[in-house]
Image (cartoon, coloured by chain):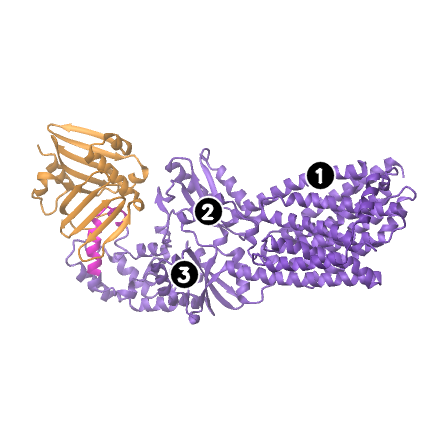
Amino acid sequence: MTNARRHALILLWWLALLAAAVGLQQRLVVSGDLREFMPPPTNAEQNLLLDAIGAGPASRLLLLAIGGAPPEQLAALSDGLVRALRADAHFERALNGGGAIDALDPQLLPYRYLLSTTLDEHALDAAYLHEELQQRVEDLGSPAAEMLKDLLPRDPTLETLKLAQRWTPRHAPLLRDGVWFSPRHEALLLAQTRAAGFDPRAQAQAVATLQTAFAALPNAAGAQLTISGPGYIGVQVGATTRGEAERLSAFGAAGFVVLLLLAYRSVGVLALVALPLLSGALAGAAAIALLFGSMHGITLAFGFTLLGVAQEYPLRVFSHRRRDADVQTSVREVWPLLRLAIVSACIAYLAFLASGVAGLQQLAVFTISGLLVAGAATRRLLPPLLAPTFRDVADSAWLEQLRARIERVRRPRWLPWLLFALALVGLWLAPTPLWQNDLAALTPASPALLAREGELSAALGAPDVRYLLVLEAPTADGVLAAAERISPQVDKWISAGAVDDVELPSRWLPSVATQRARQARLPDRATLAAALDAALAQTDFQPGLFTPFLDDVETARHLPALTPEQFARTPFGARLQAMLVRRDGRWLGLATLSGVHDAAALKLDANSNAHVLDLKVASEALVAAYRTRILFALAAALVLLALSVAVAFRDWRRAWHVIAPMSLATLLAFAVLRAGGISLSLFHLVALTLAAGLGLHYALFFERPVADRAEARRTLHATLVCAGSALLVFGLLSTSALPVLRAIGLTVALGVLFHFCLSIQMARPR
Amino acid sequence: MRLLRKPLLLHGQLDYAGPGKLGKRVDAPYRETTTIADGTVEVMREGRATKHFDLQHAPELQALLTGFSALLGGDAATLQQFYTIDFVEKDATWTLTLTPRAPDLLRHLRALIVMGKASEPRCFTLQQADGDSSTMLLGALAAAALPPAPTPAAIAALCTQP
């Protein structure tokens, strides 16, 4: 093949990959929804939990503050932003404190007698009316007179205000110029996204929309918009992690290029070295797109990590070229071992397919198809494209010296057993819990972000993301009744200071039974008119002033009870609708808590059909269950791997020489992490798996009987380049301050080190 | 809109105890004590539970209080900041009209009018946006005999009588 043709083909390969990447980007949906990466829920509680984690009302709230301008301008900006967000499909609702009192639909005004608690304690008789009217006279002599004047003829007992007060959060921010303001003189707003809180992609879109909408407001210049809330923090943390990973990977890639240039003294290998891995990754993504349609972001990250073993395939091909044979011959000689590594890894990942978790199945499909394509590309496409001129790496003198030195290394048979014992001691002495169940601890948000969220959340009285009060009943009305039953208990919590506020669905709408009971206490028109006349006798109110009141009460006596469906059409309806969820033929009520000070005090009767759900504890339990599945899948994978190596060798002794160093190195890496006080997470497990895959290569190639010292030098060279590049890339990641990157980097780097040393100790034939 | 058959006449006492501190006591026709201090409003009515609320929850009241304090404390600069001031002298009597600058306050309060003679303020009138008004008679006038249904014109005449 001519050089020109070779170069053209390499370019063609790159272009084909690029085209495939562009095509896939349009077809494959990468979702950030954590729920896809969790085990399927096995009971109603977990089902609800998965919903609540991402879709619960609290996790979808964005907390906004506008500052840096005079109050009037801030208030105008606040109003403008709320209007813009209400018209935007990304947001379900937007609140800024404006328009609270007249928000009850005029059509529904007579319902105030069924919604307000007044009739539970008082009858509308002459004594009560007299007392109320006397207070109204006093109100007219106070600065509040102006506000009440329009209301009085229709509503002398001020039920409208009582409802407005009932529907105002207990810790609502201060109102100024008609909108919420913080003690720091910023206008405050709440926006609820349609997208789930833990869908970083959708949250990022919502945040971008929000920022655009704000910037588009007239006189937004000079004012600053601060955003906070769970979704926003997720977006920020994701961006920080990605930025850090990209930065460290760029350093790693630069180091890798230098390493390649030193190892092969050829620029040409740079154009080729990435092609098999990229082909494999794209094939994996294409397989996911075909079989699943969408892919979780974590699957993609884990899949790329596991596929990292494929980076070794072209390196083995480069290092094993020899002067006295053409490239096809030298590839044919190392191919059986590479094929064995690929096939046994693929068989091992089949265990993931059986796990029953969508995320793990996707991971298996991605990794298996990626490894197969990367292997096939290395075997079939790569060799013809290699430059005809090359340097046989066996020629270097220092490599022979190193080989001879390694040859002389003493390999006492007791050493592996000693290391095994030390590893067990290390595991035994480990000072921390074995598992880190809190996934968020791996990607922590900056203290400044959290402090700002805490401040805004307190100023807005925003609901707690961690706790949720769940009510259950066969009907929606049953949920409302259950909420009414626990309401006295909830009031006790609040007065005891255990929690600042609990927003029960019954705060918005009483059950039908309660509405009927109140309705039954409403007097008929003649009785009420007589009572009113008696009450008015000693006051100066204009005669006939309260006719609208008499009309409303009469109307209220004949109203059908207000149902959640009807209430849903009112301005407050969305609030109630978000709290009532139909699931599996039953109804759930989700009440949000704000300002939880003493979670242990929030206990409810077992027969109240209600309980407080701690989302953190529950989701950690879910992660633990999930990890158990991964552990079983990994154990099964290891057994399958050992079996396939043994079957391929048809020799248990040789198989043991490969499996033993790999297993011991994995155990050692695990023990060192634990002895260093690190609690393990999914990320550590995936990193240990990658290291084991790399270790399999080292052991397989060291174990291979070779014809001469030159071939032994080539094996050593290949393994040095492979291990060196892995140490470089993952060693850099381990320097990160971000726990998730450090977890992956440190684990792989430690693993590679142990696998390399133990393969030298244990894999080579004696 | 007229809710009552005749104007509401309150008798009582107003105490100004320095900036931000105001007390209003109503003795008749009912008893009520309102105290504003340290940003908190406390309303005590005979035979009922005392009500407290944060002054910041009632920005209009706060603006009124600031104006009031400035007026009684002789703080012209603060007064200028919150109100446009119009001063008219006629014979020995004078009328000071304060119009709120804040649009929010203006929605409820058209003007705050103080009428007096020489160095003695006599009447303090709050003119609401819908035309209703309430007048407080101070000093010697507090004891003046009023007709059973006084009109705003009659009260104004009383305040500006030489």
Q: Can residue A616 be seen in this view?
A: yes
Q: Main secondary structure of the magenta part?
A: helix
Report the residue at 73% width, 40% height from top. A256
User: In the rendered structure, which amino acid carries the disc numbered 3?
Assistant: Leu
Labels 2 and 3 share a subunit: yes
Report the residue at 35% width, 46% height from top. A174
Image coordinates of residue A202 in percent, x first then y, are 57, 49
Mark 3 vs mark 1, CA separation in Å = 59 Å
Q: Is residue A377 visible?
A: no
Labels 3 and 1 share a subunit: yes
Q: Name the residue under label 3.
A: A504
Report the residue at 84% width, 49% height from top. A379
| Lower sequence index among marks 2 and 1 | 1
**Residue A255, label in figure:** 1
User: In the rendered structure, which amino acid carries the disc numbered 1?
Assistant: Gly
Q: Mark 2 points at which residue?
A: A453
Q: Quadrant of the N terminus of chain A?
A: top right
The tint of chain B in the picture is orange
Mark 2 vs mark 1, CA separation in Å = 40 Å
- Circle 2 — which element? helix
Image coordinates of residue A217 in percent, x first then y, are 47, 37
Q: Which chain carries label 1?
A: A
The tint of chain A in the picture is purple
Report the residue at 30% width, 43% height from top. B59
- Circle 1 — which element? helix
Say whether residue B35 is magenta: no
Answer with the quarter of the image where residue A645 lies. Answer: bottom right
Query: Dot 2: few (<14), some (14–19), or many (≥20) neighbours within 10 Å?
Result: many
Answer with the quarter of the image where residue A35 lies. Answer: bottom right
Mark 2 vs mark 3, CA separation in Å = 24 Å
Magenta region: A129-149
Q: Mark 3 lies on which chain?
A: A
